Image (cartoon, rainbow, N blue to C red):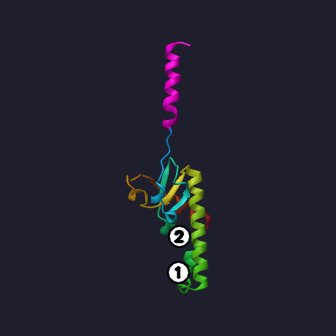
Amino acid sequence: MNKRVIIIVVTALLIGPWSALALAIAPEHVDEQRVFWGDPKGFETPAEVDYRAVVQATPEYSELRKKKVEKGSAKYWILLNNASERALRVIGEVAVSTEYDLVVDKGFLGELTPPLEGKDITSQVLDTLAKQD
């Protein structure tokens, strides 16, 4: 082997593992209620979504509002739970199709120290949700 090949191989071995470093959120800063998709302990392409807007765009939430279901009633909690489940399912579908490996509540990444940036995929999630109705 010539010197140049050896240098390239050594450089690749030294730099290679560091070139695709994953991001991580320290366990003490993870709010499980604001993580909708992926693993906050290791990710590369984060995204954010306005979860409240997605829930409010579901057919279940529309029914809740349209029928003026009494807040706190069994029907209310069933519809709200179904709206939440649908929102999480659609968020997951969009995450998979767009290859985002972490999706969190809008604003969460910016509150971290240091703050992280994530693409807002709310419109994509709302579009996907609208196509399913």
Q: Determine the main secondary structure of the stretch shown in magenta.
A: helix
The residue indicated by pointer 1 is 65
> Residue at the location (53% across, 17% down)?
5
> Residue at the location (49% across, 26% down)?
11
Residue 61 as seen in the image, left or right of residue 113: right
Magenta stretch: includes residue 5:
yes
Disc 2, SS: helix
Q: Amino acid at mark 2?
A: Val
* Towards the viewer: 87 or 102: 102
Residue 33, horizontal then vertical, whole percent: 51, 66
Q: Amino acid at mark 1?
A: Arg
Residue 110, horizontal then vertical, whole percent: 39, 57
Disc 1, SS: helix
* Towards the viewer: 77 or 114: 114
First to last magenta residue range: 1-19
Crowdedness near tag 1: few (<14), some (14–19) or many (≥20) residues, C-alpha within 10 Å: few
In the image, residue 41 above or below residue 2: below
In the picture, the disc for residue 55 is: 2
